[in-house]
Image (cartoon, rainbow, N blue to C red):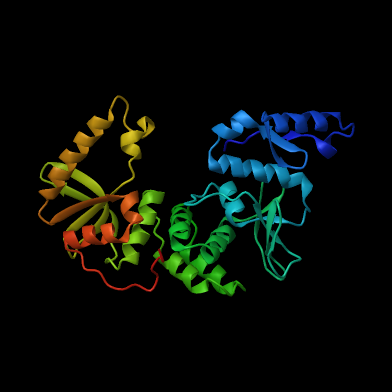
Amino acid sequence: MQRLEIIRGGSADPTGRRGRDLAAAADRGALVRLAPGRFVDADRWRAADARVRHLARIDAIDELVAPRLVLSHVSALALHGLPWNGEFPEVVDVIDPERETSQSLRLLRKHPGKGRVMRFARAVSGRRVSDLSSTVIDIALTQELRRSVPVLDVALHRGVDRAALRARLDASSAVHGRDRARFAIDFADARSGSVGESVARVALDELGAPRPELQAEFRDAAGFVARVDFWFPDHGVVLEFDGAAKYRDPAMRAAGLTAEDVLLQEKRREDRLRRVPDVLQVGRFGWPETQDTARLRALLLGTGLPLEARRYRRIR
């Protein structure tokens, strides 16, 4: 996992000279100050993605905060390499075993941990971090489904046991978010192919679509035709989620293929899929439709899928 080098001044330099030089470099824009006496190179910071930047925030505060604090929530998620469909915060999430209430500070967001039975992993620095299952439960309790379900999907794919997650949730003393977290755990599916597909599945459920089969395979007389994102066998409908990366990002395409080649392949694949007797309709949607209720509803109704009210519906 990529990490940015933390440049230390302040208390790490008893002479104070290096600290003054680093502060001056930060004032010039050559460095980015993440915490008192803790800096990173500005060019590398700008080139880094959001997860790497958050990991740098974690590394910057590690020596400055009390050893009892346990990295948790979104910060633990970043360390465990779990997906995150949201902005990484500018503060570091920790659990304070001595606190009964939350506390927001300039660099930290403390979550209450008094009386909580915790399981730990270890960060590179040696600091305790909530283990994978605990992190997943914390995310499920505190985040909306569009953020928690992708995390749970990946956790199940890594081998985390669903029943164990339910048991951990039942043993939790958390008051808020329990019903939503239980729903997220039950809704999660290790077969989800990407964060986009996970979010799309939540969006479908918000509109009351039937629950699809994931990664269903289709064959014809010539052999394998396709593995599809969402299959609704009772209605003969295939839905595919297009995340656009396979068209725009060369790294997501087979060697030598252009975006036009991929489009042509997709069209031929879809034409062949439509000729499979059980398939009556094929629909495609992407990130824009997951954010637009009217567009997604029209697409679903256009394929013949029935919609019914759901308990958990995102408020827009």
Q: Where is residue 98 in the image (x, y as percent from the top left)?
A: 76, 66
Q: Nearer the viewer, residue 63 or 104?
A: 104
- Residue 195's place in the image compared with 222, above or below, is below
Question: In this rendering, does residue 9 appear at all?
Answer: yes
Residue lying at 39% horizontally and 59% vertically, measured from the top left: 189
Question: In this rendering, does residue 191 appear at all?
Answer: no
- Residue 156 location, quadrant: bottom left
Q: Which of 178 and 116 is in front in this view?
A: 178
Residue lying at 54% horizontally and 46% vertically, measured from the top left: 81
Residue lying at 13% horizontally and 44% vertically, measured from the top left: 272
- Residue 301's place in the image compared with 247, above or below, is below
Q: In which quarter of the image is the C terminus?
A: bottom left
Residue lying at 61% horizontally and 36% vertically, measured from the top left: 3
- Say left or right for 129 vs 181: right
Q: In which quarter of the image is the N terminus?
A: top right
- Say left or right for 171 vs 249: right
The single residue placed furthest to the top in the displayed view is: 256
